[in-house]
Amino acid sequence: MIRYLLGRLVRLVLSLFAVSIITFVLLQLVPGSYSDLQGADVGSGLGGSSVVGGSGGGAGGEEQPAWLSYVQFMKGAITWDMPASYKYPQLTVNEIIEQAFPVSFTIAFLAMIVSVCIAIPTGLIAAARQNKFLDYGPMFLFTVITALPGYLFALVLILVFASWLRLLPTGGWNGPQYAIIPVLALGLEHVARMARFVRTSVLESLREEYVVAARAKGATPATVWVRHVLRNSLIPVVTVAGPMFAAMATGTVFIEALMGIPGLGMFFSVAARTRDLPLMMGATLFFAVLLMLVNLLVDLSYRLLDPRIRYQTPRTSVRSRRLARAQLEAVNQNG
């Protein structure tokens, strides 16, 4: 377990290193700069172009080599002391993340609850009523929903509940009522995928031998579902729930930008429009760390949900496969 965890952490660090280099190079290749878009100098309080390299975002001071700018930025990222934003020079990038991410996290967390509360019961009912109306109806609806862009739900909810009924605000972030539309929009966007996955997972569990054996022994349907089907169907659902939450937390860009919600997604959208390179770089790395940590937690949760799962490092996995192959060859020779 410890060796597996250490191996995953090493791969996480290497992946972040690769993401940082790719992001930095792509930002350097994009033409233009913050000063070009603003039509004026950014000011001298941003540390010049030493933030993200020679393509020039800030003003004041000589341009430095790109590699030196990358090293300086990564040093600030590791020590959580990143440079100031171009668009918001009074704030450093880490201060913006500290202020904005809790808003995005709140929306994503509540949206995840909405998705789970709708998707799991719907998937269970569809599996229990396979090839009937309660199966075909919701699954067809979810197929249509999957094909629609996420921000469309926000537009529809704003039109209905804010413009027509005037029950909810159209945007902003100043109380619980401001969270209803973005939470519903983000949650409904992911309901379809989870519900279909729950249905498939339950149907596979219903065909397992231990379920058939339990029914043959006279177990009641409730006992079969509670003791055998639901628990074993939970593991595949977790594999979707973890990345889905990360996708929600990192996918609030459109909704926050549309509704003027001061979350990290809105700041990232502003940074992309204004070529605020420090903020884009910092937000991208933060999103990457979040996604990788969630995936790591999902992998570690497998052991708690299914004791049969054993963690192996790549070396022990190769050794196990060789041992299994040798045992199989011995059995074939003896046979």
Image: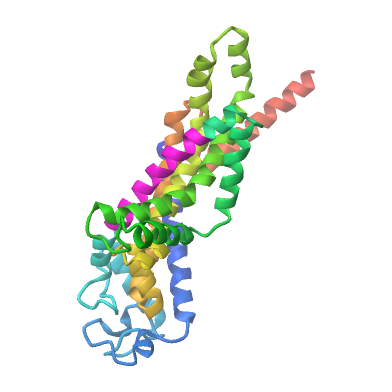
Between residues 40 and 284, which one lies in front from this camera angle? 40
- Horizontal and vertical percent for residue 102? 27, 55
Q: How is the image coloured?
A: rainbow
* Chief SS of the magenta region: helix
Outermost residue on the bottom side: it is 40
For the N terminus, the quadrant is: top left
Instruction: Say whether residue 40 is visible.
Output: yes
Q: Which residue appears at 63% of the width and 38% of the height?
A: 136
Q: Percent x, y for residue 299?
A: 46, 40
Q: Which quadrant of the view contains residue 77?
A: bottom left
Front residue of this view, candidates 235 and 181: 181
- In this picture, is 31 found above or below 227? below
- Front-most of residues 296 and 191: 191
Q: Residue at x 47, y 75 (%)?
A: 25
Q: Horizontally, is 227 left or right of 277 in the view?
A: right
The x and y percentages for residue 92 are 24, 71
| Residue 16 relative to residue 211: left or right | left
Queried whether the magenta region covers residue 105, the answer comes back as yes
> Relative to 145, does residue 68 appear above or below in the rendering?
below
- The stretch in magenta equals 102-122
Whether residue 282 can be seen here:
no
Q: Quadrant of the C terminus?
A: top right
| Residue 86 image-quadrant placement | bottom left
Note whether 23 is above or below 187 in the view shown: below
The residue under the point 48% across, 18% down is: 227
Residue 315 image position (x, y, % from top left) = 54, 41
